[in-house]
Image (cartoon, grey):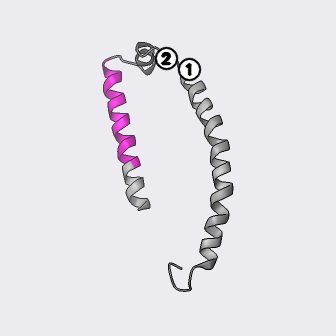
Amino acid sequence: MFLRSLSTLIKFFIGAVAIGALLNAFDISAAEVLAELGMTPDHILAFVQDGISWALPNFILGALVLIPIWIIIFLLKPPGLGR
């Protein structure tokens, strides 16, 4: 499973570099594309920071509930099942 995911990430990386090189050959930059979309790199960074600041507390809260439940289920599982 890990190798399949890694293979997919490598293919994505190679494809992104190839497309970026092709667009660069036509003198198209990321800043120009973002400007056409009405966005700036600072706006995207702020959007990502807002998303992380929203998701991280919710992730921690969910983990505080799920981890003890997982531990209890793991400890109560009959011997020989999935160990």
Q: Residue at x 49, y 17 (%)?
A: 39
Q: In the rendered image, which residue does mark 2 sit on? A: 39
Which secondary structure dominates the residues rendered in magenta?
A: helix
Name the spot of residue 31 as percent of width and height, x first: 46, 17
Rendering quarter of residue 64: bottom right
| Mark 2, secondary structure of its residue | loop
Q: In the rendered image, which residue does mark 1 sit on? A: 43
Rendering quarter of residue 70: bottom right
Is 15 above or below relative to 34? below
Name the spot of residue 30 as percent of width and height, x first: 43, 21
Q: Say whether marks 2 and 1 touch (CB < 8 Å).
A: yes
Q: Residue at x 62, y 31 (%)?
A: 49
Name the spot of residue 41 as percent of width and height, x first: 54, 21
Q: Looking at the figure, which quarter contains the N terminus?
A: bottom left
Residue 71 on the magenta span: no
**Residue numbers of the magenta segment:** 9-26
Q: Amino acid at mark 2?
A: Met
Is 76 above or below relative to 47? below
Front position in the image: 4 or 18: 4
Question: Mark 2, residues whose alpha carbon is within 10 Å: few (<14), some, or many (≥20)?
Answer: few
Q: Residue at x 37, y 53 (%)?
A: 7
Lateral position of residue 46 relative to residue 26, left or right: right
Is 72 above or below relative to 44? below
Label count reads: 2
